[in-house]
């Protein structure tokens, strides 16, 4: 019974949603991509209305705004971007400068003030990696914190609600981060499939030393050419939502190098950020333990294992109980 009570306590921290719902008209938050909408919804719950622009499956590096989306942006109280490098985001910046958009638009500088960081592409001239930044929990918190400030500016009468919602989100993310960091050894390395995957592993202490496809404009590297590098790393990481040819290349590389394979999700819609953070982290830990999870996101959900391992590690319980008592 004692263990059952502890498990229930930690399940609450993993699934807790904001408990305060604002009355009256809610601020409209428009994000450029679906994962950012997942962060905002997870952080602020029913206190805001959230929609995203770029539909799932569309190439965000090619997508252009429609006339109806420009009208939507005119109504937005807050607009959340990945930082500003996508064509849609550059166009949003132009519309803001010319006065077509009156809501607050959040770009890279807004996030950097809250702790956002670009990782360096170790495999590609050491340049900043702008792809998949939301997968890093530090960046997710920075994006949410900047959004909180923008919401408070847009709707100061409910500033305390947005602050409370953000604190709950921060506590949940930090609990997940602490639990999984405790399960990963230091100085591990990986070959990733594409640059976004770097942000799902390096916060865990796993360095991406090579990428099958180094950049958008660069052709993929042949599997056989990467085998010697892969034989020296600890695992291979790929996105289950990536093109089939690249998924197959990652699987072939894992097979030929004898290294475990971790399947993560890079783009998703309609799901909380923390749920994806748990699933991706669990997939990486399982791969390091010699178990490769199935590709289906639903089958990869393993909150029970997360709870049990976290309890054994002694990481999450204190935070969980603290959040529960505050509520």
Image (cartoon, rainbow, N blue to C red):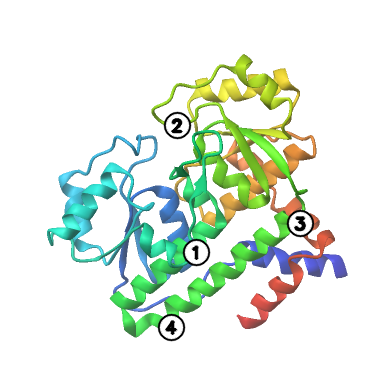
Dividing the picture into quadrants, the one containing residue 8 is bottom right
How many marks are shown on the rendered structure? 4
Identify the residue shown where x is 33% and y is 37%.
Answer: 61
Q: Is residue 211 left or right of residue 204?
A: left
Secondary element under disc 4, as helix, strand or loop, is helix
Identify the residue shown where x is 29% and y is 34%.
Answer: 62
The answer to whether residue 208 is seen in the rendering is yes
Examine the rendered structure and indicate whether residue 56 appears above or below residue 161.
Answer: above
Label 2 or label 4, whichever comes before in sequence order = 4
The picture places residue 210, in percent across and down from the top left corner, at 59, 31
> Circle 3 sits on which residue?
182
Q: Nearer the viewer, mark 2 or mark 3?
A: 2
The picture places residue 156, in percent across and down from the top left corner, at 32, 82
Disc 3 to disc 1: CB gap under 8 Å: no
Label 4 or label 1, whichever comes before in sequence order = 1
The answer to whether residue 1 is seen in the rendering is no
Identify the residue shown where x is 62% and y is 52%.
Answer: 203
Quote the CA–CA distance across marks 4 and 1: 22 Å
Label number found at residue 160: 4
Q: Is residue 52 left or right of residue 317?
A: left
Disc 2 to disc 4: CB gap under 8 Å: no
> Circle 1 sits on which residue?
115
Q: Nearer the viewer, mark 3 or mark 4?
A: 3
Task: Report crowding for label 1: few under 14, some 14 to 19, many 20 or more residues within 10 A (C-alpha).
Answer: some
Secondary element under disc 3, as helix, strand or loop, is loop
Q: Nearer the viewer, mark 3 or mark 1?
A: 1
Disc 2 to disc 1: CB gap under 8 Å: no
Examine the rendered structure and indicate whether residue 51 appears above or below residue 193.
Answer: below
Quote the CA–CA distance across marks 3 and 1: 22 Å
């Amino acid at each position: 019974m004692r263990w059952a009570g502890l498990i229930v306590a930690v399940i609450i921290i993993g699934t807790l949603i904001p408990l305060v719902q604002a009355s009256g008209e809610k601020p409209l938050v428009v994000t450029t991509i679906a994962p950012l909408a997942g962060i905002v919804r997870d952080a602020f719950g029913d206190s805001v209305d959230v929609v995203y622009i770029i539909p799932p499956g569309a190439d965000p590096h090619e997508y252009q705004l429609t006339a109806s989306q420009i009208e939507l942006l005119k109504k937005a109280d807050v607009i959340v971007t990945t930082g500003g490098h996508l064509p849609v985001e550059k166009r949003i910046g132009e519309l803001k400068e010319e006065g077509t958009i009156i809501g607050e638009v959040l770009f890279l500088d807004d996030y950097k003030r809250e702790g956002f960081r670009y990782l360096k592409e170790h495999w590609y001239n050491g340049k900043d990696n702008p792809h998949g930044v939301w997968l890093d929990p530090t960046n997710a918190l920075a994006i949410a914190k900047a959004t909180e400030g923008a919401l408070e500016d847009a709707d100061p009468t409910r500033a305390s609600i947005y602050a409370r919602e953000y604190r709950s989100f921060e506590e949940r993310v930090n609990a997940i981060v602490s639990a999984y960091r405790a399960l990963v050894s230091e100085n591990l390395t990986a070959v990733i499939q594409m640059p976004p995957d770097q942000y799902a592993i390096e916060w865990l202490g796993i360095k991406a030393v090579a990428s099958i496809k180094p950049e958008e404009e660069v052709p993929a590297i042949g599997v056989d050419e990467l085998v010697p590098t892969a034989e020296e790393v600890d695992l291979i990481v790929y996105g289950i939502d990536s093109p089939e040819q690249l998924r197959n290349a990652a699987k072939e590389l894992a097979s030929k190098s004898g290294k475990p394979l971790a399947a993560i999700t890079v783009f998703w819609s309609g799901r909380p950020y923390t749920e994806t953070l748990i699933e991706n982290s669990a997939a990486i830990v399982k791969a390091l333990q010699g178990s490769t999870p199935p590709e289906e996101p639903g089958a990869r959900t393993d909150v029970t294992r997360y709870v049990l391992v976290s309890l054994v590690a002694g990481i999450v319980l204190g935070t969980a109980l603290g959040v529960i008592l505050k509520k």
